[in-house]
Amino acid sequence: MFESGSLSLSGSISKAALEQAEVISQVDRKFIFVKLTLETKSRDSSSSLVMIDQHAADERCKLEELLATYFHRDAHGDLTATTEPLDPSIHFEVGHLEGELLERFRHHFRTWGIDLDVRNDGGKKYERVTQVTSLPPSILERCRLEPRLLINLIRTEAWNLAETRQAPLPPSRAPEGSTHPWAVYMSRCPRGILEMLHSRACRSAIMFNDALTIDECRDLVRRVARCAYPFQCAHGRPSMAPLLDMGTGQSAAGGILAAEQVGMDLKEWTQD
């Protein structure tokens, strides 16, 4: 639910209202202009004009698509990270203490789809060699091209776990009937993995200056409405902003703004 009281509107924007939104037009090849119904405490209905950031909205959709495929259900109905073999595997050396940490948290990494093996380096008494043999498909190619990202991810996560002295609980049985079962567990995901997923979603999303047809605008609005967190982009910033309460004429800026004036302004923007 997107609370709009702080924006001088009389109600809240819900996911259901977003899914039923009337798409008016694309604006300046950056935003999607929609009209939707506000949820109010009274029975009186009210509508709002809302501007949706097309990049932020598609970025959110792309991120949740990646998160939805990160896990699969095993034979017991538990959520298990999907992995693919890494060929060739990635090797890196660590000190003895760090090697012990990686051994201790090996199951934690496996929970998130990172299979690693730590062994002694025969030629160096105080060093260990870590071999990463499989990774989640969503980050595999990036790690193959930039192995330093993976190495930093693993080492940083191991030290973070050592400092907190307790590994986060691993994903297990998904809530029955949950539309987004991954949402319960991703808050415990290693930060480095989330950062790579965020980056991938950002790079593959619709960009500013990408022209969209009215049907493509409608499709994007419907897709973002089905997301677990439709009101923020992958980086946590708002993906949309209410402009005008059609019932009260109150604008998000706190002044009175006629709907006709909004239409005139939009016409000027789209003609530039």
Image: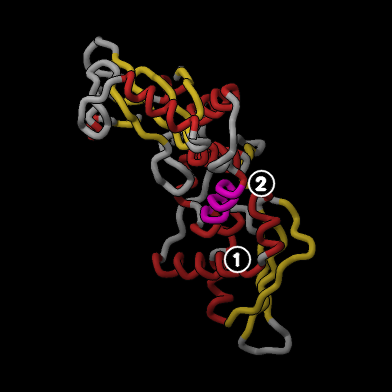
Amino acid type, mark 2: Thr
Residue 245's place in the image compared with 174, above or below, is: above
Residue 226 sits inside the magenta stretch: no
Q: Does residue 217 show up?
A: yes
Residue 3 relative to residue 21: left or right: left
Q: Is residue 197 magenta?
A: yes
Q: Residues within 10 Å of mark 1 (few under 14, many from 20)?
A: some
Q: Which mark is residue 82?
A: 2
- For marks 2 and 1, give the CA distance: 20 Å
Part of the protein shown in magenta: 194-203
* Quadrant (top left, top right, bottom left, bottom right) of the N terminus: top left
- For the point 68% across and 55% down, the residue is 140
Q: Is residue 175 left or right of residue 119?
A: left
Q: Residue 216 versus residue 157: which sits nearer the camera?
A: 216
Q: Earlier in the sequence, mark 2 or mark 1?
A: 2
- Asked where in the image residue 168 lies, by quadrant, the reply is bottom left
Q: Which residue is mark 1?
A: 149
Please name whichever residue, 141 or 220, is drawn nearer the observer in this view of the structure: 220
* Farthest right residue in view: 87
Disc number placed over residue 96 in the picture, else none:
none
Residue shown at 21% from the left, 32% from the top: 254
Q: What kind of secondary structure does the magenta stretch mostly adopt?
A: helix
| Residue closer to the observer: 85 or 220 | 220
142 versus 7 height, above or below: below
Secondary structure of the residue carrying numbered label 2: loop
